[in-house]
Image (cartoon, rainbow, N blue to C red):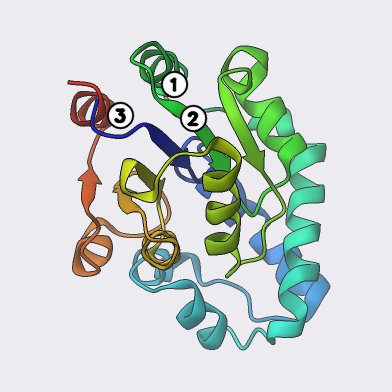
């Protein structure tokens, strides 16, 4: 076992939410007076980090918490349309059986995480930090480290965005990136995560062997 503590992002990492987000993006844009996402430009947008995306779409930082809250609220009403990526429930079980302590740190709500993952998977988590601000994950990662008492050198944070890699670095832990989430794999690779996973099975082999 390479890491004693494995912390996951939720959206785009454990749960398949990208298509859902794109589907409601026009509604959010109209509600908050923002530019709509050009669906033909999604591939290009997936190459950028969160700060660049906010700038390209002229999103004032003061609006971000309100947009995030609305995102969580809309998902809660349509939660039955969201599911974990195939293989994720088994991945979590296998990691726990191998002795890894598991946790989630996400901008989504803890309630949405629980409902999507289900009782069995959420019961494997030592901590679930939800409602984290867009650029606030590093402090929550440190909180999970304190809660579990596990040394940063024995921990990894796995996400699907460039900001997840950066948050892990600021928290002093290893970074893992998944190729099946929001951010393009080449863009993730350019930011040199400690580990890059192209499939759930690959992650399992890398973390458990």
Q: Residues within 10 Å of mark 2 (few under 14, many from 20)?
A: many
Residue at coordinates 69% horizontally, 47% vertically from top-left? 130
**Numbered badge on residue 102:** 2
Counting from the top left corner in percent of width and height, residue 51 is at 50, 80
Q: In front: mark 3 or mark 1?
A: 1
Residue 166, quarter of the rendered image: bottom left
- Number of numbered discs on residues: 3
Counting from the top left corner in percent of width and height, residue 160 is at 40, 52
Q: Residues within 10 Å of mark 3 (few under 14, many from 20)?
A: many
Provide the secondary structure element on which disc 3 rests. helix
| Nearer to the camera, 69 or 195 | 195
Circles 2, 1 touching at the beta carbon (< 8 Å):
yes
Circles 3, 1 touching at the beta carbon (< 8 Å):
no
- Give the distance between the C-alpha atoms of the residues marked 2 and 3, in whole angstroms: 16 Å
Dot 2 or dot 3: first in sequence order is 2
Position of residue 89 in the picture relative to residue 184 (left or right): right
Residue at coordinates 41% horizontally, 35% vertically from top-left? 5
Compared to residue 137, the image places residue 181 above or below, namely above
Which image quarter holds the C terminus?
top left
> In this figure, which residue is indicated by the disc labeled 3?
200
Dot 2 or dot 1: first in sequence order is 1
> In this figure, which residue is indicated by the disc labeled 1?
92
Residue at coordinates 68% horizontally, 84% vertically from top-left? 61
Compared to residue 78, the image places residue 66 above or below, namely below
């Amino acid at each position: 076992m390479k890491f004693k503590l494995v912390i996951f992002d939720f959206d785009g990492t454990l749960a398949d939410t990208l298509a859902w987000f794109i589907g409601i993006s026009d509604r959010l844009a109209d509600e908050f007076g923002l530019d709509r996402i050009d669906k033909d430009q999604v591939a290009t947008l997936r190459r950028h980090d969160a700060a660049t995306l906010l700038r390209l779409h002229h999103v004032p930082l003061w609006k971000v918490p309100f947009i995030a809250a609305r995102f969580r609220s809309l998902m809660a009403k349509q939660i039955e349309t969201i599911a974990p990526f195939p293989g994720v429930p088994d991945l979590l079980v296998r990691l726990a059986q191998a002795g890894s302590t598991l946790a989630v740190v996400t901008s989504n709500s803890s309630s949405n995480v629980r409902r999507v993952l289900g009782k069995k998977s959420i019961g494997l988590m030592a901590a679930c930090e939800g409602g984290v601000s867009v650029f606030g994950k590093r402090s929550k990662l440190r909180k999970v480290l304190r809660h579990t008492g596990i040394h940063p050198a024995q921990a990894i944070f796995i996400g699907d965005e460039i900001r997840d890699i950066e948050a892990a670095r600021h928290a002093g832990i290893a970074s893992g990136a998944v190729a099946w989430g929001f951010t393009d794999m080449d863009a993730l690779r350019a930011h040199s995560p400690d580990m890059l996973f192209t499939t759930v099975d690959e992650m399992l082999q890398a973390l458990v062997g």
